[in-house]
Image: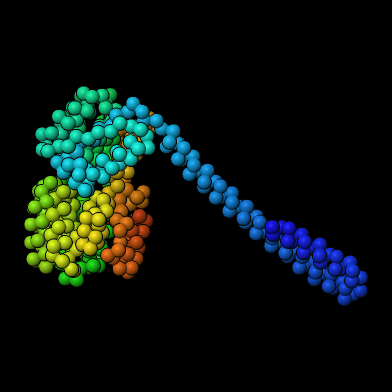
Amino acid sequence: MKKLLAMMLTASLTFSLVACGGSSSDNTAETAASEAASEVVEEATTEDATEEVAAEETTEETEEAAEETTEDAALDGSGYKIGLVTDVGGVNDQSFNQSAWEGLQQAQKEFGVEVSYLESSTDSDYASNIETFIDEDYNLIICVGYMLADATREAATANPDVKFAIIDDSSNADLDNVTCLTFKQEQASYLVGYVAGLTTKSNNVGFVLGMSSETMHLFGYGYAAGVLDANPDCTIQQMNANSFADSAIGKTDATQMITNGADVIFHAAGSTGLGVIEACQEAGDGIYAIGVDSDQNYLAPDTVITSAMKRVDVSVYDSVKALLEGTIKGGEVVYDLSVGGVDIAPTTTLLSDDVISKVEDVKAKIISGEIKVPSSQSEFEATYGDVYELD
């Protein structure tokens, strides 16, 4: 359309010049008219070229998205069986195990694989649940949590032709048939700790740990570091519930912290953490909880201000996709902030714009390496001293 207008305007100007004759003043007018016409043509050409480039880019993006969708859709999982073995938290823990199951259900929906899960009531169930899937010729067995590490190693060593994936464990990375799915949970915990430090009115916050282990302490190091970087004067109450499946203990621990002045409490405790959220909710206005693993705001929309997310669902989905593509292999796959493997929860309705802005700034600095979140006891204590008490 712009080209047509430019051509019409040029023709009109040319016709006018011919009609006017050829005096000196007419020559000047002719020159001005020609320049004006040239500018219109040049502008139209430039705009058209820009539109063509934009159209080409849009087309390329659409084609790339279509190719990715087609590629995933082309993966036929018919005949593949994928099994999930939970830890003692159970598949409906509204946290860690549930996220893993949701990822597997998504893989079933998209690829047509057959999926199933077995819940572990006690530690002694891990080996027998894994063995059940082996006996039923499952193609991939996904073990949820570092507590299944020993059972996974034993089964994988005895059955080298069976593929395994285990979440939150790297000790089995030396086995060719075990994919270790690990997360930089200290990064997500740092972010929610930063939120807690900025949000607390009493300069007193809490942390409830599900169980003492090297993996779980990463939550504590990250949280405590984030709190203190945002608010150096803040007190951090800490308790180890020693269970991932006892909400009553979680509620008792959180209630004690609230009594002692805490107004923001973070849990990294699976189903036990549901009791933490309940205690904060019952305490009323001004007392807040921070969830873990998934966005737990829906459990108490006026109480859970954010959550430290670990995309366990994504890691499970990725593992199934790799199995179908024939690219799954032993070793460790790390999910961190830079790839969206961990993050702060998307629900931010209870946070001020100022807090959100500061957290986004901190997030960018973690990704760039400007902020290094401690990932061990020695790294934490080198910067913050002996503040974290549960290791």
The residue at the point 30 percent across, 63 percent down is 349
**Colour scheme of the rendered structure:** rainbow
Residue 166 seen in the current view: yes
Q: Position of residue 232 (x, y in %)?
A: 21, 68
Which of these two is toward me, 72 or 332?
72
Q: Position of residue 204 (x, y in %)?
A: 15, 67
In this rendering, position of residue 294 left or right of residue 48:
left
The residue at the point 33 percent across, 52 percent down is 337
Which of these two is toward me, 17 or 226?
17
**Quadrant of the drawing holding the N terminus:** bottom right
Above or below residue 328? Residue 288 is below
Q: Quadrant of residue 363?
A: bottom left
Above or below residue 140? Residue 315 is below
The residue at the point 21 percent across, 62 percent down is 303
The residue at the point 74 percent across, 61 percent down is 6
Q: Position of residue 59 (x, y in %)?
A: 56, 47
In this rendering, position of residue 126 left or right of residue 22:
left
- Tally the numbered discs: 0
Residue 334 seen in the current view: no
Q: Position of residue 119 (x, y in %)?
A: 17, 37
Above or below residue 262? Residue 242 is above
Q: Quadrant of residue 46?
A: bottom right
